[in-house]
Amino acid sequence: MLYFARWKVLLIVGVCALGVLLSLPNLFSRSFLAGLPRFLPHKQVALGLDLRGGSYMLLKVDFAQEQHEELRSTINRVRNALLDANIGYTGLKVAGEEIHFKIRQAGRIDGAQAVLRKIDPELQVTIKSDGEGMMRYNPVAIRSRRLQAVSQSIEIIRRRIDETGVKEPTIERQGEDRILVELPGIGNPEHIKKLIGRTAKLTFQLVDTGASLASAQAGNLPAGDEVLPAAAGAGGESAYVVRRRVVVGGGQLVDAQATFQNNEPVVSFRFNSLGARRFGDVTRENVGKPFAIVLDNKVISAPVIREPILGGSGIISGNFTVRSASDLALLLRAGALPAPLTTLEERSVGPSLGADSIHAGALASIVGVTLVVVFMFLFYGLFGLFADIALFFNLCLMVGTLSVLGATLTLPGIAGIALTMGMAVDANVLIYERIREELRAGRSTLSALDAGFKRAFGTIFDSHFTTLVAGGLMFWLGSGPVRGFAVTLSIGVLTSLFSAILVTRLQIVTWLRQTKPKEIPI
C-alpha cells in the first residue's frame, strides 16, 4: 500500500500535469492563443450547433437517379456489344432501375446473354424465350454502390464547405442514404446550401450538327444522341442535340479558377495528362465543329473548335457574374457529386439560443460538481478532499482529451461530463466504504487501506467496463446528440478509473508517509 515506484509517481504526476496543460487553452480566446508560441497547446473543444448556433441540414442521396444515369451510359456499351456480335435487337431503353431490350432472333438468345454478361459482372442479364431481355444490378452491387455514393458525397461536401471557410463543420452519415450537415456559426446557409446541392457534373460532348433540333424534339432522335436544354443566360440556342458519348469528364480536371477574359468573368480549367490527351485528340479531329460544355445536364456553352487544344487547359464562358464564376470553379475543384441530394430537414439555431444553452449547461454542471465536492468533504473529511482533488484532475483530463481529439461539445456531451463526475466520486465512495468495513472488522490502518483499494477495485472495474460497453454501443448505433453523449461518457469512464484509483491512492500514500497517523479520519 505504501510503496509507489518512482516511475509510477512520475507517470501519474506527468499525466495530471499534461491534462491541466491541454485543458488550459479552453480558458482563453482564439486571438490570445494565436499570439502564443507554437510549441504550446492551442487546441480547444469545439462547440456544437446547439451551443454555438448555426444551421442544420439532413440530406438524402438520390441513389435511384444516379443508378438511372449509370444505366443510360451503359446503353451505349450494350448497343455496341450487340452490333459487334451481329445480334439484332429492338426496344433498347432504360426503364426505372433496368435496361430493357428484345432480341429479334430466338436462336441468338444464348449468344446475346454471353456477350452482355461480359459488359459488367455486377449486371444481371435475363432473356426470356421470346427474346424479351432485362439487365439490372444485383442486390450486392446495389448496396455496395449506395454505400460508396454516400461516402463519396460526404467527402465532396466536406471539400466544398472547407473552401467556403466554414470552421468546424459536422458532416456524417445517418442511416444508409442520409447525410447530416451541421454548420456552427452560420445563420443563413442559403449560399452554402446551393453549393452543396449542386451535382456539378461537368462533361464535354460533341454537338450533332447533322441532326435537326426540331425533328429531335418531335421524337426523331438519332441513335446515340440526346437533347439537352441550354442553361439560363447561356445565349444561343434554347437546346442542343449532342452525342451521348462523353469526350472528357469533369473527373479529369485537376484545377479550376475564376478569372477574367475581355473584362468578363470566366472559369479557366486544366486537365490531367489523360484528360489533356483525350481533349487534344477530339479537338484535333473535330476542327470547325461545335462541342458542348455540359453542367448538370444543361449546356452552359457550345463554342466552335477553331483549332486543336493541345495544352490540356481551356476557358469556360457563359455570361457569368464574379460570384457565379467563383462558385463554379469551387464546385469543379471539389468534384461532382455521384448522385443528386435532396434536403429532408433544415433548421437554424440562433446564437442567443446557443448562449442560453451554454449558460444553462454550465450552471447545471457547476452546481452539480459543487454539490458533489461538498458531499464528499462532509461525509469523508480529509479523504473526501483527496477525492475532490482527483475529481479536478479527472475533469482536466476529460477536457484535455476532447481538445486534442477535436471533439465537438454539445448539450448531451455536457450531460455526459456531469454524469462522469458522479461516477468518478462513486468509485471513491466504494473504496472508502470498503475501508470503513475493514476497520470495523478490526484490521489495522495499513491493512484496512490496502484491502479497501484491492477489494473495491473489482466492483469499480466491472461497473466502469459495462458503462464503457454501453457508451461504445451508443456511439456505434447512435448518431448526432447520442454520439456526443457517448464520446464524453466513454472518455470520462477511462479518466475516472485513473483519477479515482491512482491519483487518490497516491495522495493517501503521500499523506500517510508524512503524518504517520495512528487512525484514519474517515
Image (cartoon, rainbow, N blue to C red):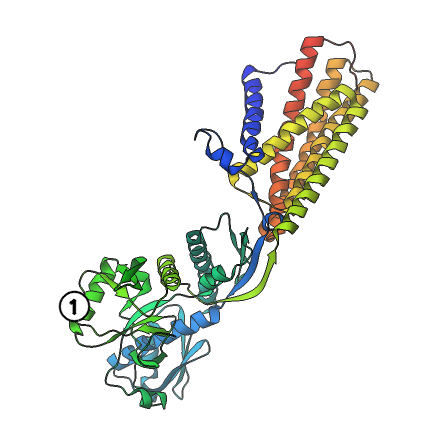
* Residue 431 sits above or below residue 403 on the image: above
Screen quadrant of the C terminus: top right
Residues packed near mark 1 inside 10 Å, few (<14), some (14 to 19) or many (20 plus): some
Q: Nearer the viewer, residue 507 or 297?
A: 297
* Residue 414 sits above or below residue 177 on the image: above
Residue drawn at point x = 80 percent, y = 22 percent? 436
Q: Nearer the viewer, residue 159 or 448?
A: 159
The outermost residue toward the front is 263
Callout count: 1
Screen quadrant of the N terminus: top right
Q: Is residue 137 visible?
A: no
Q: Which amino acid type is marked by label 1?
A: Pro
Q: Is residue 34 left or right of residue 379?
A: left
> Of helix, strand and loop, which one carries label 1?
loop
Residue 276: % across, % down: 22, 61
Occupied quadrant, residue 460: top right
Occupied quadrant, residue 21: top right
Residue 157: % across, % down: 45, 57
Q: Which residue is mark 1?
A: 308
Residue 124: % across, % down: 41, 73
Residue drawn at point x = 51 percent, y = 37 percent? 30
Q: Is residue 273 left or right of residue 39?
A: left
Residue drawn at point x = 49 percent, y = 31 percent? 41
Residue 376: % across, % down: 77, 27
Q: Is residue 356 visible?
A: yes
* Residue 67 sits above or below residue 520 on the image: below
Q: Nearer the viewer, residue 336 or 42?
A: 42
